[in-house]
């Protein structure tokens, strides 16, 4: 069969709210043209993020009902720990409330002034936590990652030569950890190959440095490896996942992505002493080590979610959905980051509306147009998100349409594609924006704009 179906059927439905174009016009103005300030009830198809927005399975919900809520030593913690040990091979498993909580604990322990943390590409919360500790976060993507039109199977790869050069320049004693983000969210949801992970590991070994994964989308990354990397096609995803984790000394995970839950995170550590220090911080700021800021029911849902994400029928459908949208946009002449990413499509907004200069936020103009035209909510990843606060303007002006897991069907995707193509036909009408107020850090969440006449 050629048709790839959603490998689930729907047991519970949530009605979508239809708003008129006039209603959306007043909603977007009231929100200062910022998608984060639009009430979710006023959004028809929400592609703001794939984080925490997925649908849980019947078995996850069953786990929620059956879970034990003891403060210490809940059986659901031990089950969660067993599942994570089985999948990742890590003995020390700490639950946290989400990915950035794992990051905060890690960088409070390993960061600090004068330290430098390399990564293929830091996600914004990782960068912010590193910088908050006083350390410097450095992105080392391969050169291909910065070229949207270039199709490369592993655009998430790290530039290993640049890593080595950085270590020699700043000194190994100033690098507490090397990070690698799988898949690379900041560069288009693109995967990192096993060969690249091994090459990073080699450099780390030569300089005696630990390697940590930012493993939010580890299963999607493994699926890409299975599809694209020589010699991997016949191996189970579970074995590839294990290879990825075996190369690392630790991992921060937001379970809101491939953990298939609405809230939850994990911190994995191999080193005994670091584990003890992380446990102490976890207790201080998140919760006791057997719940880490979560309820027992969240641990039950996570344990089941981490199992389900390894289902290859699911991963095939998942990765194909993004590819399907990407192919249709490309066929209509709309430039996206090629090839399509695992969890999202990234539209090249600078190419979409070349009449709007970066100083007038072309990505934000496109995001506003998609909401206005069809009630679709995407997110700008460009000068709004990364500019301001003394940061240089980013290389790419992108709009990310991220796909929640198991939530929307193919007809929702067809609707989204049709809407984007309609906006593209009338792209001359898109108008730039001017900032009228902004907060000092992570400005995209609260910034307000006005349209330039
Ligand atoms: N690392 C990566 C690669 C991420 O994509 C995210 C979150 C985090 C860390 C932080 O995890 O949100 O659970 O604290 N990404 C979401 C997104 C927010 O929309 O891409 P968190």
Image (cartoon, grey):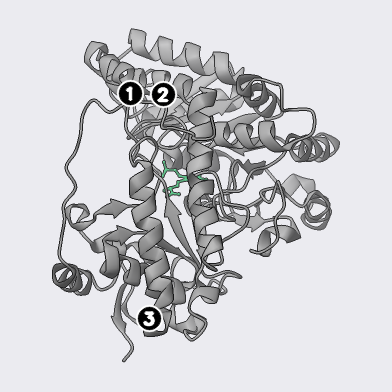
In the image, residue 181 lies at what x, y percent?
60, 43
Marks 3/1 in contact by CB < 8 Å: the verdict is no
- Ranked by sequence position, the earlier of labels 2 and 1 is 1
| Residue for point 53% across, 29% down | 1
In the image, farthest residue toward the front: 1
Q: Alpha carbon of mark 3 to alpha carbon of mark 1: how far?
A: 40 Å
| Residue for point 42% across, 79% down | 427
- Ranked by sequence position, the earlier of labels 2 and 3 is 2
Instruction: Kindly identify which residue carries mark 1.
Output: 57
Res. 316 image quadrant = top right
Instruction: Kindly identify which residue carries mark 2.
Output: 305
| Residue for point 43% across, 50% down | 402
Q: From the Cβ of disc 2, is ligand 1 less than 8 Å away? A: no
| Residue 264, visible in the rendered structure | yes
Q: Secondary structure at mark 1?
A: loop
Residue 165 tag number: none
Tell me the crowding category of disc 2: few under 14, some 14 to 19, or many 20 or more residues within 10 angstroms, Cα based: many
Q: Secondary structure at mark 3?
A: loop
Tell me the crowding category of disc 3: few under 14, some 14 to 19, or many 20 or more residues within 10 angstroms, Cα based: some
Res. 52 image quadrant = top left
Residue 430 tag number: 3
In the image, residue 443 lies at what x, y percent?
38, 66
Q: Nearer the viewer, residue 200 or 441?
A: 200
Q: From the Cβ of disc 3, is ligand 1 less than 8 Å away? A: no
Marks 2/3 in contact by CB < 8 Å: the verdict is no
Q: Nearer the viewer, residue 302 or 11?
A: 11
| Residue for point 75% across, 36% down | 229
């Amino acid at each position: 069969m050629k048709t790839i179906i959603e490998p689930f059927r729907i047991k519970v439905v949530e009605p979508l709210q239809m708003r008129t174009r006039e209603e959306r016009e007043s909603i977007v103005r009231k929100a200062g043209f910022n998608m984060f300030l639009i009430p979710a009830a006023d959004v028809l198809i929400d592609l703001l993020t794939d984080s925490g927005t997925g649908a849980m399975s019947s078995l996850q919900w069953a786990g929620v009902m059956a879970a034990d809520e003891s403060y210490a030593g809940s059986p659901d913690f031990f089950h969660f720990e067993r599942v994570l040990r089985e999948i990742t091979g890590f003995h020390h498993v700490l639950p946290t409330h989400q990915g950035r909580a794992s990051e905060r604990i890690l960088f409070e322990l390993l960061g600090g002034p004068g330290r430098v943390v390399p990564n293929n590409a830091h996600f914004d919360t990782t960068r912010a936590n590193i910088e908050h500790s006083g350390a410097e976060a450095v992105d080392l993507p391969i050169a291909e990652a910065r070229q949207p039109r270039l199709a490369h199977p592993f655009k998430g790869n790290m530039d290993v030569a640049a890593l080595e050069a950085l270590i020699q320049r700043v000194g190994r004693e100033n690098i507490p950890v090397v990070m690698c983000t799988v898949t690379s969210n900041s560069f288009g949801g693109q995967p990192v190959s096993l060969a690249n992970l091994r090459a990073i590991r080699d450099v780390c070994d030569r300089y005696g440095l630990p390697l940590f994964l930012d493993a939010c989308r580890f299963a999607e990354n493994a699926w890409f490896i299975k599809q694209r990397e020589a010699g991997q096609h016949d191996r189970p995803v579970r074995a590839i996942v294990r290879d990825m984790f075996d190369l690392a000394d630790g991992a921060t995970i937001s379970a809101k992505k491939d953990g298939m839950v609405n809230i939850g995170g994990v911190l994995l550590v191999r080193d005994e002493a670091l584990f003890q220090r992380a446990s102490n911080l976890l207790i201080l700021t998140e919760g006791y080590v057997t719940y880490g800021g979560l309820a027992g029911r969240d641990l039950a849902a996570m344990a089941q979610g981490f199992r389900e994400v390894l289902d290859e029928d699911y991963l095939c459908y998942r990765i194909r959905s993004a590819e399907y949208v990407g192919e249709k946009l490309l066929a209509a002449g709309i430039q996206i980051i090629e090839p399509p990413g695992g969890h999202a499509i990234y539209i090249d907004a600078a190419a979409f509306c070349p009449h709007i200069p970066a100083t007038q936020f072309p990505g934000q103009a496109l995001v506003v147009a998609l909401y206005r035209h069809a009630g679709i909510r995407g997110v700008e990843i460009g000068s709004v998100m990364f500019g301001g606060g003394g940061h240089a303007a980013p290389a790419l002006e992108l709009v990310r349409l991220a796909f929640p897991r198991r939530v929307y069907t193919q007809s929702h995707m067809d609707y989204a594609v049709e809407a984007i193509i309609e906006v593209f036909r009338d792209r001359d009408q898109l108008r730039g924006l001017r900032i009228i107020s902004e907060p000092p850090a992570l400005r995209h969440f609260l910034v307000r704009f006005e349209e330039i006449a």
